[in-house]
Image: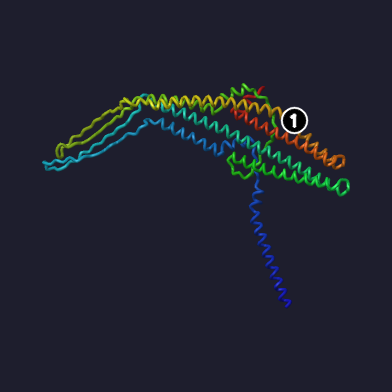
Amino acid sequence: MASKKIGSGRAGNSAAQLAARVLVALIAILIAPTIGLAGAAAETVTVSQAVRIALQRNPDLLAARQELETARAQLVKAHYLNQFNPQVEAGASQAHFQFSPGGDETQPAATVSLELEVAGQRSKRIEVANQNLARARAGVADAERLTKARAEYAFYQAVYLRQRLELMQRIEALNLRLRDASMVRFHSGETPKLEANLAAVRYDQSRRATLLARRDYENGLRALQRVLGMQPRGLIEPLGSLSAQAPEVDEERALEVAMANRPDLRARDYGIRQVAADIALTRRLIIPNPIITGFAERTADAPDQFIRVLGGAVSISIPLFDHKQAELTALAGQLRRASYERTATQLSVEQQVRDALTAYDAAREVVQLFESDAVARIQESFGLIEGSYRSGKTGLIELIVAENDLVASDSSYLDSLWDYQVARIGVETAVGTDFQAMAKP
């Protein structure tokens, strides 16, 4: 009886061990992808590298660049020696000789015709294609300008969110130490239970703020990877900081550079030239193209008696009714529209530059309000209030008020640096170049 119990106990232990092994294997399978993802090395990237990668891999920009292929195809077609292919026509007829013993004879015939461009139509067509290609290139340059701005914005946004996360982590660590210190003071009878509870609540709030900041930072990394044309998995680390010099910008110089460099303005100019070239081409199309025809045929007067005929002809359309009036009227409307669009774009560029400079000047003044050692002094103040609380010189309420002020100062400084970067990117995007071309000496 005892042996049966021992056997059943061993069987139960074996089953339990097997179940435990299966459970461990399942857990390993479930967490293996997570471990692999967490262990994957993050790719580091600087702002200049981010811009270069975006210009090479951003799918929206790559799609915009395909407009160049369409424009190049039009230019290739314009360079054809002739826009019209020759037309070949062949046929045959059967001649029946009723009173001749020879019977029937086949009479083959063939014609070849070709329409020729005249009046310089080919050169005008090439000019239209050239202006269209130049307009497409300017459009791609404008897409590159905006892509560069999006890459810089996403990069510095990720840097800002990382520094914000680091700030929240420092505050959380401080509140954790203060919570532990308040518990020690409570157990020693120096402070009431209420103070210890307030410290614990304070720590919980800072922990929640850290988790939210981490979420925002990871979302910012994925947004950066999306702009760079990478899989948005967050495995990237921006190298850099928000701190930078804030040079003064010459407004009139910035406007002058913008009017000369903005690719969308150049695209409007090329659009006007393209329509003007199209008008010149259409006027040449009023002159009809001649059609040259050559033919050859063989006729039979009698069985085994043939006559070979070779000849040619020239046909031309008489522009009696169609003088391209409708096409020229439509093109005149397109030319006026292109001119108005160019004026509207110019006004928009001027407005964008002035608005960007206004935002930049405001952000620049705010950054200059903070001294270069502002962050160091704030960090030193955090240490001072912690030491003061531990020594019993400061109560929890006074500490919370002081900590709130320091956190607000640190956050304001960080926000001002972020606002400055956004304003700087806005100015460079509006002007179409970097600061070296418009900064005051």
User: Residue 404 placed where, x, y %?
Assistant: 77, 38
Examine the rendered structure and indicate whether residue 20 appears above or below residue 416. below
Say whether residue 143 is left or right of residue 182. left
Examine the rendered structure and indicate whether residue 62 appears above or below residue 197. above
User: Residue 67 placed where, x, y %?
Assistant: 49, 34
User: Residue 128 placed where, x, y %?
Assistant: 44, 27
Occupied quadrant, residue 61: top right
Using a 10 Å C-alpha cutoff, classify the residue at mark 1 as few (fewer than 14 neighbours), some (14 to 19) or many (20 or more).
some
Picture residue at 16% right of the left edge, 41% below the top: 96
Query: Residue 175 or 316: which is nearer the viewer?
Result: 175
Say whether residue 231 is left or right of residue 111. right
Say whether residue 9 is left or right of residue 78. right
User: Residue 260 placed where, x, y %?
Assistant: 56, 24
Picture residue at 82% right of the left edge, 47% below the top: 196
Occupied quadrant, residue 399: top right
Which residue position is annotated with label 1? 370
Toward the right, the furthest residue is 189
The quadrant in which the C terminus is found is top right
Query: Residue 326 or 298: which is nearer the viewer?
Result: 326
Say whether residue 96 is left or right of residue 416. left
Picture residue at 69% right of the left edge, 69% below the top: 12
Query: Residue 99 or 248: which is nearer the viewer?
Result: 248
Examine the rendered structure and indicate whether residue 115 appears above or below residue 389. above
Occupied quadrant, residue 248: top right
Toward the front, the furthest residue is 194
Check disc 1 and report its element: helix, strand or loop. Answer: loop
Q: Amino acid at mark 1?
A: Phe
Toward the bottom, the furthest residue is 1
Total label count? 1
Q: What colouring does the structure picture have?
A: rainbow
The quadrant in which the N terminus is found is bottom right
